[in-house]
Amino acid sequence: MSANSASPSSRLMSGNRCSLPVAVFIVLVCLFLLQLYSLLPQKDAFKLDPQIHTSRRFRELDEVDEENIQMPPPRKRSPRAIKRKPKRPTTIIDEFLDESSQIRHLFFPDMKTAIDPNKGNGSFYYNPGRIWLDTEGNPIQAHGGGILYDERDKTYYWYGEYKDGPTYHAHKKGAARVDIIGVGCYSSKDLWTWKNEGIVLAAEENDETHDLHKSNVLERPKVLYNENTGKYVMWMHIDDTNYTKAHVGVAVSDYPNGPFHYLYGKNPHGFDSRDMTVFRDDDGSAYLIYSSVDNSELHVSPLTKDYLDVTNVVSPILIGHRREAPAMFKHQGTYYMITSGCTGWAPNEAMAHASESVMGPWETMGNPCLGGNEIFRETTFFSQSTFVLPVKGLTEYFIFMADRWNPADLRDSRYVWLPLKVAGPADQPLDYEFGFPLWPRVSIFWHKRWKLPFRWSE
Ligand code: DGJ
């Protein structure tokens, strides 16, 4: 067979032989181009992978500060004082609670270091423990508080105990107290600059039988907006001087900045109710969570549709754990709660809890506090939980709000706001009562100074 008469298949073979290097070259070029494309900045990176984007943007929030507080040298005591009360070793908590401690300024820095929105410097930085001034230059009075984001006017409202009076003990063994003044309310668009909206629920001056009589106790007010009725509903802890009444109180208003009208107080489900909070779920259902049975357990109860009462359904949770100061929040379908132990105004160790349902059962995961030093972590950074605020625009971060109580002068109690994150490796639960899945870790990061990332609300 002559060369010209070569079969089609052999022509193809010879063609293949020639084009192989070309084909390899084309494949290499394609791979190179692909590689180049992947290195180009992606315009839609946020949309493609919000998690990666978020973690880069918010990394600073996880970088905790360390603390190294030295105990002051022991103070000289007279031989008579030593005989009367032999000295036990002093702890940092004793120093924290002692008004005359040489290191008191570390926990309660004075007015010179106040956060002042009228002064440009330090804008948007949270400084846990420092005095925080409102837009008129007065210390914010919103202790044991909570925040409502009002969708209607795109404003945050911070409600809390207005404690601007002298601290005293009604009885020798009674807890330190101030007379009720009322519930203070502050508004803000940026969560840093707070305008005083005034006392939105005021104490009763004259009627001694009224729940809000100034000689009683009004603590931990929280407000929810009810979409069915268009009303703002406030829940609070109402008590007598000795904390024996143990009621919840309910007030209502047409506006977020009041005035609120007090409706009634009662023992929910016939139980004692001391520290409490309310929680609104995504579907509009809301719950009351309260410390009960002498603080030995918490109770959870769904509220009625108008949020003005509890339903007759109640679930005891964390039985025997002795927790108070509950602050509930939700992340990716799981419910979380931070609580404190029960030591009056003195700080103690926080615990994080998780559940698949608000009604429980709940599991305790352990201490969420990171950074500072051991004593900072064991005292919730010398503070007590009051609220966990979901922040618009942030996915895995929340603001943990706590009170640094000053039992010697309660009106001078401070705010400790810190970033809280639900993410990362599964936590090791402290109790396995129900054989639950492992939850992602809840972390509260200690910072001497921190701020929300630039344009966080977008
Ligand atoms: C601890 C509570 O959490 C506070 O709200 C307050 O009731 C104090 N006890 C009173 O000692």
Image: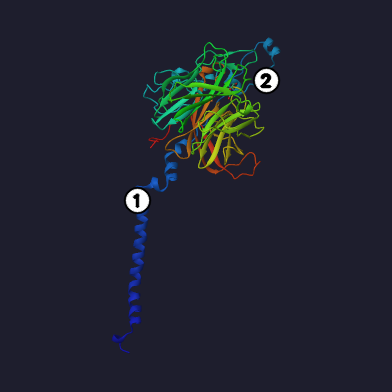
Tell me the residue that label 1 is attached to.
Answer: 40
Ligand 1 near label 1 (Cβ, under 8 Å)?
Answer: no
Circle 2: residue type? Arg
Residue at far right of view? 83
- Left-right relation of 82 to 95: right
Which percent across, then down, holds residue 315? 62, 35
Residue 171, by quadrant, is top right
Residue 280 is labelled as: none
Q: Mark 2 points at which residue?
A: 88
Residue 209 screen position, x and y as percent:
58, 14
Left or right of 93: which side holds 4? left
Residue 354: percent from left, percent from top:
57, 39
Quadrant position of ligand 1: top right
Mark yes or no: residue 259 visible: yes
- Of residues 408 and 121, the one nearer the viewer is 408
Earlier in the chain: of badge 2 and badge 1, it is 1
View extreme (bottom): residue: 1
Amino acid residing under circle 1: Leu
Residues at marks 2 and 1 touching, judged by CB atoms closer than 8 Å: no
Q: In which quarter of the image is the C terminus?
A: top left
What colour scheme was applied to this rendering of the protein? rainbow
Q: How crowded is mark 1: few (under 14 residues within 10 Å), some or many (20 or more)?
A: few
The image quadrant where one finds the N terminus is bottom left
Residue 131, can we see it? Answer: no
Secondary element under disc 1, as helix, strand or loop, is: loop
Q: Is residue 434 above or below residue 301?
A: below
Q: Which of marks 2 and 1 is in front?
A: 1
Q: Looking at the picture, does residue 456 appear above or below residue 25?
A: above
Neighbor class of circle 2 (other Cα within 10 Å; few <14, some 14-19, many 20+) is few
